[in-house]
Amino acid sequence: MKYTIQIVGVGGQGVLLASMVLGNAAMNRGYKVAMSEVHGMAQRGGSVLSTVRFGDDVISPLEADGCADLIMGFEPTETVRNLPLGNRDTLVLMNLDPVYPSMVAAGFEKYPEIDDLIKSVTDVNPNMVTLDATKLAIEAGKAVAANAVMIGAVAAMKDFPLMKEDLLEALKAQVPEKFLELNVKAFELGYAAVKN
Amino acid sequence: MSDLLAREGKQLLLGNEAIVRGLFEAGVDFASTYPGTPSSEIGNLLEKLASDAGMYFEFSTNEKVAMEVSAAAASSGLRSFVFMKHVGLNVAADPMMTLAYSGVTGGMLILTADDPSAHSSQNEQDNRYYSQLGLLPMVEPSTPAEAKEMVKAAYAISEETTLPVLFRTTTRVNHARGVVDLGELGTPKGKGHFERDVVRFVNIPAHARVNRKRLLELMKKAAALSEESPLNHVEGEGDVGIITSGVSYTYVKEFVKGASILKLGFTNPLPERKIAEFIKSKKYVIVVEELEPFLEDQVLRICAQSSISVPVYGKRSGHLPYAWEFSPRTLEGISELADVQRFRESMPATQVKLPGRPPTLCAGCPHRGMYAATKKAVGSRDVIYCSDIGCYTLGVASPFQTADFIICMGGGAGAAGGFAAATDQTPIAFIGDSTFFHAGVPALVNALFNDHKIIMVILDNRTTAMTGHQPNPGTGREFGGIQTEPIDIEKLVRGIGVKYVEEVDPYDVKAATKAMKGALEHDGVAVIISKCPCPLELKKRRMLEAKRCEVDQSKCIQCYTCLKMIACPALIKKGESVETDPTQCIGCGMCANVCPKDAIEVRR
């Protein structure tokens, strides 16, 4: 068994925390884990990509583009931008809540219609699952828990090789005590949103 | 969260975390750095943990000084560790080149974190050549787990050869993460003692000539160690041979079948006999390495000297690229030569026009205010914006476009003097506080000395921001049980004789504009100190005051001056009106300051 998740989003969305949770859950299951993270300059509001790979025989921190098993998209344009990381059998999980780049916010560039973004995935891939992670996080108590929603959602994806309990335990170990309840609730909402 | 001082267990560690753990297991006494990505996390971790591990650690003024302090420690019988990004080693190359002549009496590692694909760098130079230039043994780990073990192995090599060892990593090792088994923690010695040895440590010409020959002999010893080292070993069988090192090994290991791999971890001096033996029995050999053909050219030379006529493929044969980092798919270049995994076809890139998302100055970043003020004051004057290495490099983007010339740390400040002498244009040099101490002071002195009419803007945000908020001489130090006073930039600048010095708060864009106008009129060297702490740092320290800006829509005339001048990500255009984004706005008031109708208010 070998599995590659490409996590894409925007600096500040909690992509690195999500990758730590997934990686630790895989390690705790006894898998080999190889990951690669974006640090430094790329983090200043720029696009962020984190690669999480695990399995019986994994050593490369990068995966070839086209070969992701799952693209975990924290933001719609980033998900679409990174489609070439996967192939038509790749599972695509896409958060529909946009984060506007500064040039869009300032009115100099246009953000695409969400429907056009959805269509650009469904045109080439039949396996997309969408959710409103930020809205679910607000329902759980706070918008910042959107990454916990996304992790919960991943746990419910078809044939995902790690158990829901493993992910939840790894999440609990990563978040500060006082945000535990919020994160667990957000995780469960994300799980339910995909499962049902 | 990772606990790098845990007694035992296994953890999912970043390469840089694994290296720090390696230092603790090796009982290293002394470490120094100037921060630079992809090595920065090592410093941030040591700032927190070094004293608990019994190690001395410092952020030095620049890489050269970092090299010198660690050289002194290793010449006093201690184990020392100096680390930096690849271009930092250029700064530190001067002491390094002669340090090898003296060698060390303890163990010393020099970590160079190279950045293929220049993810956060100005070039992608291959620092492996420094090992040949400086006659230093070198090791190259492939994974975080191996990096930790190799720290210990490299200290053994250093102590056996009495030479500093180059520890060469790349971004995909430093910022890779993998499972690492923790070993036993070592015990640092504490203080060392320097034993005088004038011939060895005083490289006057007569001694240097002696030491040069001694160094060549020591490198023979290193070559013998390399031949025997388990860091250089063969994996698998087959008549196709692959020679590889660093992260490239992980791509070959996982995605190529049926080849025999010579994995090189001890890469200077190369194990020439081992390589010759390996090649002899092969149909042909492929060398897989990122950047320059460092291994490949030596393999070709070894073949020629050993009269081996086995073909060698790689970059010289056109199968593999020189530019940019590798990925598993790069191996498609050798698919006619080896059994490379077939990769799936990618989904096509979308036809929908996606907005760009380049890294940008943060909401409320004080650099925005100083840039807006400069643009306003400069107007249509013919200026050259000399910029430097740091967050403020991001001023290259619209709407500021305040970077016309960037080469290296302190390079903008130096070049500004040259532009002043060589053209009739007005050079304006932007430089951060940490960069000013690193390499800006000599450039400023040079401008005074040679009467270059430059304007230097010191963007003093009270931290080394881009690399993750390290302290610098302008902030003073407060860790590891040592406290020092901040060095006052204004006093320093006045002290060396700059006549026009203005310290401004860049959030007051109007005042900053006035200071810049004054500097443009001044006949001589002018310095503006734009002083305001980095809000991201304040946020981290929970010292950011809760404030936000609000637009009074009844007063706003939709002239968009705020958007055009400050372009803050917290300013949002909705339809025709401008609003602030409460999740991003920090209430700095820069937009309010430039609003011609006082339509923006700062609320507490």
Image (cartoon, coloured by chain):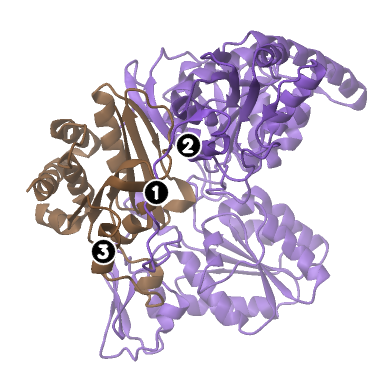
Horizontally, is B212 left or right of A100 in the view? Answer: right
Q: Say few, some or many: other residues with alpha carbon within 10 Å of mark 2 (under 14 / 14 to 19 / 20 or more).
A: many
Is residue B327 found left or right of B525 in the rendered image? left
Q: Which residue is mark 3?
A: A119
Q: Residues within 10 Å of mark 3 (few under 14, many from 20)?
A: some
The location of residue B509, given as percent across then percent down, is 48, 76
Q: Is residue B499 above or below residue B239?
A: below
Return the chain for callout 3: A
What is the secondary structure assignment of the residue under circle 1? Answer: loop
Which residue is identified by label 2?
B328
Which residue is pictured at 50% across the width and 24% down the height?
B147
Q: Position of residue B127 (x, y in %)?
A: 66, 36
Please, what secondary structure does the residue beneath circle 2 have? helix
Q: Chain of mark 2?
A: B
**Foreground pick, B472 / A3:** A3
Element carrying mark 3: helix
Q: Which residue is mark 1?
A: B346
| Amino acid tagged 2 | Pro
Chain of the residue under the numbered disc 1 shown in the image? B
- For badge 3, the amino acid type reads Lys
Same chain? Circles 3 and 1:
no
Q: Residues within 10 Å of mark 1 (few under 14, many from 20)?
A: some
Residue at 67% over, 62% down: B494
Give the CA separation, mark 2 to mark 1.
14 Å
Q: Position of residue B234 (x, y in %)?
A: 56, 14
Q: Amino acid at mark 1?
A: Ser
